[in-house]
Image (cartoon, rainbow, N blue to C red):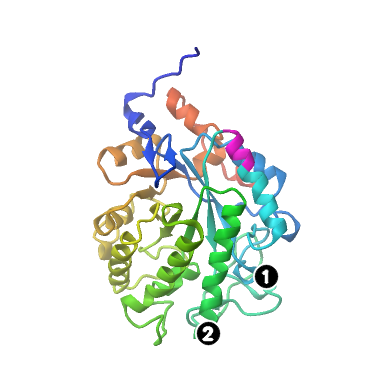
Amino acid sequence: MASHPLSPPAVTSLFTPLPLGEDLTLPNRIVMAPMTRCMAGPGLVPTEAMAAYYGRRADAGLIISEGAIVRPDAQGYPNTPGVFTAEQVAGWRAVTSAVKDAGGRIFCQLWHVGRVSHPTYLGGALPIAPSAVPLAGPIAHTDLEYGTPRALDADEIPPLIEAFATAAANAMDAGFDGVEVHGANGYLIDQFLHYRTNHRDDAYGGDPPRMARFALEVVDALCEAAGADRVGIRLSPAAYHHLRPDPRDTEVFQYLLPALDERALAYVHAGIADDTWEFDYLGGRVADFLRRHYRGTLIACGAFTPEGAAAALAAARCDLTAMGRPFIANPDLVTRVRAGEPLIPFDEAMLDRLE
C-alpha cells in the first residue's frame, strides 16, 4: 500500500475532516473560494476548459464555483456563466462530473449583481437595485462605467426570489452538492443589507428586520429547493467592495445572523479580501464578527496562507478556511500543503489562462 506524507505540524489542523450537513463530509478544511474568471462560452454556457479547471482542483475539501447568474438581468461582467437555461445546466453537469470523478465536492454560487452592471449586458435596460443609488467607477474587464440603477418595484421581488430558487434546483440537477447564496461584495442581496444602497420604506427597507427580509426569503426559497444543509451564504458586513459602510449596517447583520442560525444552513462564508483587516464598527475582523453572532459552520476567507489558515482553525475563529488566488497558481494546492511543499506564487498573468 502506498504511504502518504504526513502534514507538517503547523498545518495538521487543515486535514481534519468536517461533516457538512447530514450526509456530506469534507476530508479537509481547505475550501476553494469562488473566483470570477469570465471564461464561459456562447450563451454563458460553461465550457470543457472550465470542467478541466475545476476537476484539477478536486482535492479541496470543498470547491465553491465562480458566481453563476440566476437570470439574464443578473449579469454584470463579460462571459460569466449562467444556471438558468438547459444548455447552461448541461455545461455545469460536465463540470460537476469532472470534480466528482476526481473525488471532489462542489457547491454552486448563485449570483445577481444588482446595480453592479451596465445596460450593455441587459439589452439596453438599466440595472436593478433596491434603490436608485448611483455607483461610480469602471467595470472590470471592460471600458464601461457604472451608472444609476433602477429601483425595484415591490411586485418585482417575488419573481427574483423564484429565479434564485429555480437556479438552485437547476444547480442540484446539474450535480452540485449544494448552493451558496452570493450575499456579499456589494451585489444585489448585499445591497439590501446596507443603508447606503437600501433607501426603501416598504417591507424590504427602513430597519434591520425589513432590510434582512430579502436575503432571508432567498435563503428560505433555496432551502426548499435544495435542503437547508446544502445551502450556504456569503456575507460582507464590512461593505468593503462596491459599497460604502454605514455604522447602522452592523445592526442589520446582528439581526440577520441569528435568523440564519435558526435555519440550520451548511455554513456562512465571510466575504472579505484580507482577513487581517479590522473595522471599528464590527469590533475587529469580519470573521470574528460573524463568529460572535453565528453559531453554525463558518468559513473564513481573505489572503490566508496555509499556516495562517491553520492558526485560525486552532484559535476556533472558524471551521473552514477559503483560499482563492493560491488555487489559481496551484491546482494541486492541497497536495502541496499536505506534503509540506512550497506554493507557487500567484501572478496576475495567471488570470488570463484557465489552467
Can you name the residue that lies furthest to the top here? 1
Q: Nearer the viewer, mark 2 or mark 1?
A: 2
Name the residue type under label 2.
Asp
Query: Badge 2 is on which residue?
Result: 155
* Main SS class of the magenta portion in the image: helix
The residue at 41%/80% (across/down) is 204
**Along the polypeptide, which appears first: circle 2 or circle 1?**
1
The residue that appears at 43% across and 55% down in the rendered structure is 232
- Residue positioned most to the bottom: 201
What residue is shown with label 1?
121
How packed mark 2 is, by other alpha carbons closer than 10 Å (few <14, some 14-19, many 20 or more), is: few
Mark 2–mark 1 CB contact (< 8 Å): no
What stretch of residues is rendered in magenta? 97-102
User: Would residue 240 be seen by someone viewing this image from the given angle?
Assistant: yes
| Element under disc 1 | helix
Residue 36, visible in the rendered structure: no
Question: Which quadrant is home to the C terminus?
Answer: top right
| 39 to 315, vertically: above or below | below
Left or right placement of residue 85 versus residue 64 in this view? right
Q: Secondary structure at mark 2?
A: helix
Q: Point out residue 63 in the picture as x, y percentages from the top left corner.
A: 51, 44
Q: Depth check: give the residue in front, 230 or 182.
A: 230
Q: Residue at x 43, y 45 (%)?
A: 322
Mark 2 and mark 1: Cα distance apart in space: 23 Å
